[in-house]
Amino acid sequence: MTNSSQIKVWDPLVRFFHWSLVTAFIIAFITEDELLSIHSWAGYLILGLLLIRIIWGLIGTKYARFTDFVYSPSSILAFLKDTLNLRAKRYIGHNPAGGAMVIILIISLLLTSLSGILVLGAEEHIGPVAHWFSASNGYWGDFLEETHEFLANFTLLLVFIHVIGVLAESLIHKENLISAMWTGFKNNKNSEESS
């Protein structure tokens, strides 16, 4: 139940996407080589979730759309500077740094997922691109596996930066952003909202 002091920000699809992506990434990361089938299915789930989110970013609700949270590099840098000085403006939806992180995470996760599909084809000779590597001598498998591993670790680094950003923003504005991603609601107080 909500009151007039709260505003609906994150729709059910955004929240489902976010927490499903978190779960799938954790599963994919911890299963790695030991449980290849589970690892692969988690990767396919990540790819499917990303495709849904990209579509929703084009046609979804106000705060889910890319047009609401893609900012210029100068706006992002100014926001980060203000954040370091503990005077960043509050945004109802994603702030400039948060919006940039969403885009970077989507790209990183897409590259990680696609490189994983290539690894499956090159090393295990299974999956949708296995036929591309039927005559391969093993070089591609090693190269692609190293690339996939690098991208997965880079994505994990981005996740840590994202969590630090969420915690910093929560402290600066005295607002529980993790709770907001569960409930969909944020406090409707002194907001600075960009058009």
Image (cartoon, grey):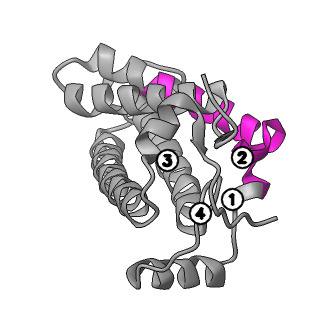
Q: Nearer the viewer, mark 3 or mark 1?
A: 1
User: Mark 1 or mark 4: which comes first in sequence?
Assistant: 1
The residue where tag 4 is placed is 95
**Secondary structure under the numbered disc 4 in the rendered image:** loop
Amino acid type, mark 3? Leu
Dividing the image into 4 quarters, which one contains the N terminus?
top right
Q: Which residues are magenta?
A: 43-67
User: Mark 2 or mark 1: which comes first in sequence?
Assistant: 2
The residue where tag 2 is placed is 63
The residue where tag 1 is placed is 69
Badge 4 crowding class, 10 Å Cα cut-off, few under 14, some 14 to 19, many 20 or more, is many
Badge 2 crowding class, 10 Å Cα cut-off, few under 14, some 14 to 19, many 20 or more, is some
Q: Residue 49 in magenta?
A: yes
Amino acid type, mark 2? Tyr
User: Between marks 3 and 2, how big is the CA–CA gap?
Assistant: 25 Å
Q: On the image, which quarter does residue 162 sit in? A: bottom left
The residue depicted at 57 percent of the width and 84 percent of the height is 78
The residue depicted at 49 percent of the width and 51 percent of the height is 105
User: Between marks 3 and 1, how big is the CA–CA gap?
Assistant: 22 Å
